[in-house]
Image (cartoon, grey):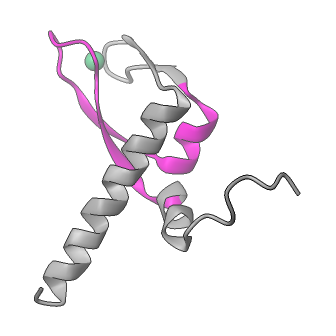
Amino acid sequence: MTGRKGKPPPIIEDVSNASLQLRCPNPQCGHEFFKKGGWLEKHKVFGCPKCGQTISFNDEQLTSLFSEHVKNVRDMINRMRGK
Ligand SMILES: [Zn+2]
């Protein structure tokens, strides 16, 4: 038991299996690609699969990437429900 702010909402678990859209930080190439949320948690520093530009995420960026994804999913669900 680590006792860090309770259990995460279940939608976060979905995010580990979800494909997150990422953009290469190199403005010259602007490559876009997808990685699984769970993969990103393990590989916070990696090369752009297309040009090799180093891409790194810290926990904060990862969290905001995930929460953005969760928000998009919620918006999509709401749209499907006609809200
Ligand atoms: Zn690139």
Q: With respect to residue 18, does 48 lie above or below?
A: above
- Which residue, as the protein is rendered here, is positioned at the far bottom? 81
Q: Quadrant of residue 33?
A: top left
Q: Residue at x 61, y 64 (%)?
A: 8
Q: Tell me which segment is drawn in magenta.
A: 17-44
- Which residue, as the protein is rendered here, is positioned at the far right? 1
Q: Which quarter of the rendered picture does the N terminus lie within?
A: bottom right
Provide residue 37's location: percent of width, then percent of height: 49, 48
Q: With respect to residue 19, does 56 lie above or below?
A: above
39, 77: nearer the viewer = 77
Q: Quadrant of ligand 1?
A: top left
Q: Residue at x 52, y 62 (%)?
A: 12
Q: Which quarter of the rendered picture does the C terminus lie within?
A: bottom left
| Left or right: residue 45 compared with residue 53 | right
Q: Residue at x 25, y 79 (%)?
A: 77
Q: With respect to residue 45, does 70 lie above or below?
A: below
| Left or right: residue 23 compared with residue 45 | left
Q: How many marks?
A: 0
69, 31: nearer the viewer = 69
Q: With respect to residue 10, does 83 lie above or below?
A: below
Provide residue 40's location: percent of width, then percent of height: 53, 38
Provide residue 22's location: percent of width, then percent of height: 31, 36
Q: Is-magenta flag for residue 31?
A: yes
| Left or right: residue 74 compared with residue 41 | left
Q: Residue at x 55, y 72 (%)?
A: 10
